[in-house]
Amino acid sequence: MYAVIQTGGKQYRVKQGDVVKVETLNADAGQQIEFDKVLMVQTDSGLKVGKPFVDGGKVTATIKAHGRHPKVKIVKFRRRKHYMKQAGHRQNYTEIQITDISA
């Protein structure tokens, strides 16, 4: 059984027991959250696809930790123009563990 959920402007394919890094959520570690924006659910009885969301679809997860991804280096460079610029970016994330999927 798996589901496709939408959070933080992105879509994730999850199944029970998965640990996923999603965009930052406003909740403390150890807290349970529910995702109601379920786009699709695959069960033993078949596939349910929402228009755009599945009616009664719900994914429950537990927040494990908050963190930051590794630094991404950004370099802007123009040859022969004596121009070079460097920057870096670290995106925040929330690590969740999927505990239950219902449709």
Image (cartoon, rainbow, N blue to C red):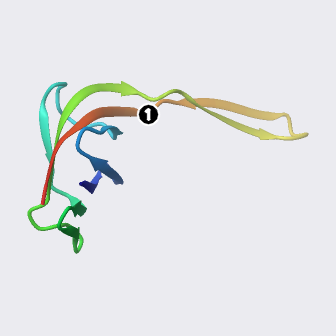
Q: Residue furthest right?
A: 80
Image position of 95 (left or right of 87): left
Q: Quadrant of residue 54?
A: bottom left
**Which residue is nearer to you in this view: 28 or 5?**
5
Mark 1, other Cα within 10 Å: few <14 / some 14–19 / many ≥20: few
Name the residue at 36% across, 25% down: 67
Q: Position of residue 79 (x, y in %)?
A: 87, 41
Q: Residue furthest front?
A: 44
Q: Quadrant of the N terminus?
A: bottom left
Q: Quadrant of residue 100?
A: top left
**Which residue is nearer to you in this view: 11 or 44?**
44
Q: Position of residue 94 (x, y in %)?
A: 30, 33
Picture layout, residue 98 above or below residue 13:
above
Amino acid type, label 1: Gln
Picture layout, residue 51 above or below residue 75:
below
Image position of 71 (left or right of 33): right
Name the residue at 33% across, 52% down: 13
Name the residue at 79% across, 35% down: 83
Picture layout, residue 31 above or below residue 36:
above
Residue that mark 1 sits on? 91
Q: Quadrant of the C terminus?
A: bottom left
Q: Secondary structure at mark 1?
A: loop
- Count the numbered circles shown: 1
Q: Residue furthest bottom?
A: 51
Q: Position of residue 20 (x, y in %)?
A: 33, 38
Picture layout, residue 4 above or below residue 99:
below
Q: Position of residue 71 (x, y in %)?
A: 54, 27
Image position of 23 (left or right of 51): right
Q: Residue furthest left?
A: 56
